Amino acid sequence: MPATMDIVRLQDHLQRSGSTWSIPHGVAANVVIPQRRLGAVAPATAKKAGEVPKLQLDRVLNYVPRNPFLVERRIANKILPPGAAIARPTSATPLTGGQPGTGPREAIRPTPPMAAGAGRAAAVDWRTRWGWNWITTVQDQDPCESCWAFCATGVVESMVRIEHCVWSKRSEGDVHDGMGAKCANGGWHTTALDWIKTHGICDPACYPYKTDDSPYAPTPDRGGRTLKIDGYTELGDVEQQKVWLDSVGPIACTFEVWHDFDVYGAVGTGVYRKANTPDNFSRGLHCVMIVGYDDQRQAWLIKNSWGAHWHQDGYAWIGYGEVRIEDWAKPGVHNVNPDPWTKRRLHSGAMVESGSGATHRNFELVATGPHGTVQHWWRQGGEGNDFSWHRGASFGNDCATYPTLTGTTYNRNFEMVFLTTGRRLHHWFLDQASGHWADGGVFGPNDAAGVPAFLQGNYGAPGNFEVVVRTADGRLNHWWRMNGPPWTWHDGGRFGGNIAFGGASLVQSNYGTQGNLELVAVLQSGQMQHFWRDDDHGGVWHAGAMFGGGISSSPCMIEGQFGAANENAIANFELCVAAGGQVQHWWRNNGAGMQWLHSATFGHNIATVVALLEGSFGFNLEVVVLRTDNRLQHYWRDGGGWHEGAIIA
Amino acid sequence: MEHIQLHVGQEMVLTLPGRGTAGYTWTYETAGDTAVVSVTLGGAPPAQQSPTPKSGSLPETATLRGLTNGHVVLRLRFGRSWDAAAKATEVREYDVVVTK
């Protein structure tokens, strides 16, 4: 096989070899399928620190990040001018009744403690910065020489968390094996980042880390589930490395492992400084992440890749200038572009945050238009403080309610399902390769009645589509499509009863090994009811708690990031629903109690909530409502509470 | 078990694969007349150190020196010494005889 291969050549190869593998529809013909040894050539050595000139960081980082903590730190370090705070399209005055909810799990982010102009922080620790953890769990390269892949992957993961406020575990095996490396091969973090720049990096379910040198074989939908980076910035100046750690995020480094490092790892405390004794000897060069520093300790805080049992939960302090840790330039990454699979639990309803735009945080909204059409809208990600909404394509002729939109692993396509005027369901998708919306066909029951819930789940790769819609008999009907030939939809059966409104309220949570399906519907009594499907035990739907009252519209629900201490934790559910002309925000603390709690009521003249998402704007919740005058309006919640945003259309 | 014959005062260097950057180290124990040989763990001989290094482990060594007449069993263990729960991934045993 050639070193690189597109879909057409891969199809031909599979056909000739008699393979039963299939290529999913919706993948553009020119999408490059990664193969082993894609030509990434390891440099003889990484750049020495002295070979890298001092950078003008205000030019490298010439945009306003949307994590408000970063904004403050970049102002403090004079990377951004004073006053470069986030501007939002309307008043930042919190709405009446829009105060954040109570309880530790619902706590809105703490107020940034630093005053602008304070200069570089004397100490940084991204494990606990501003009361939050920004670092994925400690991994273990055991027994391979793959530290370079682990630290590059870890840096990218942390930058997704910092810049987009979402956990995103990436696969060290993807970059390691994708480069054709063997278990015994050393390497450089910059070589790994070069490969990620060209090919992206996928999640472990697409291709895991393995140690047996088996062939590299990611899932066929890899192209749609890779996180992308534009490149990396090499920092040679130690002071600039600290400024980067303070105002951007973790960096990668190389140092020399000496014999006494094992002793320190086992029983040492404090800061590691090499013993200058005759029996000490060098055992090789090691790449790790630096996740902080402390000028008082005179040390870097490293995240090792030897498992959480090593030293202090996998972390250690290495003294400044020790073991050649400042010999080589240290690469950092910024402006990462997460994939839709990473964000799959963070949106429901008619809007997603896509990877489009210069900083990869555009909003994409689909709404009903005249004569049964669907209208695509999109919003700038705030570059240059531009939050304007723009009209996209219009298509279709049988749309009866607001569509439910998601981003999928089909080449990052947008896919939607809506109720038709003929009481069925219609699937459309935006083919990212062509930029055109395509008709995916009509399916579903003959008596669908309401806004459908729709997501891509994790059964298979590309994952199945799962739809739940209320039917005219007051029940909920589950439909699913296996995303392989012949791509037919299947009736998964009906459940529940006395349902008045379904909605875009389906989440595949990370409960269980497979991930349960979770859904909230509105009963004819006006109460809401939580349903869940136990996917580890037969996939049976169960009726859960009832809560609220007086509801007469469709809810939207997500599993956000509040309450998730790391990438493996189960985060809170967040739900917004219209009642009495206002929006009610509910949440369930999935860390303790699992009770549904009413957090806030806000807004005015609201008929229904059509979208809810948690995006890249500092863990804010973003809501789009349909007003009683049939106009669309944006609301959002930040640390100050709920705010009224722009009228979109 | 390999056999090693040493004279008193004679040295032998065993070159061992390294995996230091994955957290592995060599440790040793002796059984029998432990005074007959000294064992020193060390780094790779200069000839085996890469002139243009990249991240990755260097070979390591165990240097044996005969001290006095006798017989000892040397056991070299390769594992993560800082992880009490981890088992050795490799064990090498040598039957060492030291003579005048």
Image (cartoon, coloured by chain):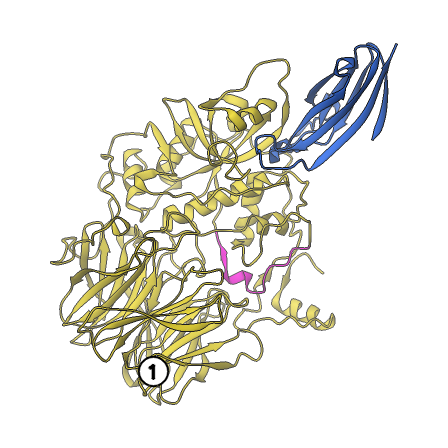
Chain colours: A yellow, B blue
Q: Is residue A380 visible?
A: no
Q: Is residue A35 visible?
A: yes
Image position, residue A432 (x, y; %): 47, 67
**Magenta highlight on residue A286:** no
Which of the pair A598/A333 is nearer the observer? A598
Image position, residue A10 (x, y; %): 65, 67
Give the residue at mark 1: A475
Residue type at mark 1?
Arg
Q: Is residue A318 above or below residue A210?
A: above
Count numbered badges in the picture: 1
**Magenta highlight on residue A219:** yes
Image position, residue A567 (x, y; %): 43, 50
Q: Is residue A28 above or below residue A150?
A: below
| Quarter residue A608 falls in | bottom left
Which of the pair B22/B69 is nearer the observer? B69
Q: Is residue A496 above or below residue A151?
A: below
Residue drawn at x 16%, y 63% as measured from the top left: A601
A535 left or right of B36 in image: left
Q: Which residues are magenta?
A: A215-228
SS at mark 1?
loop
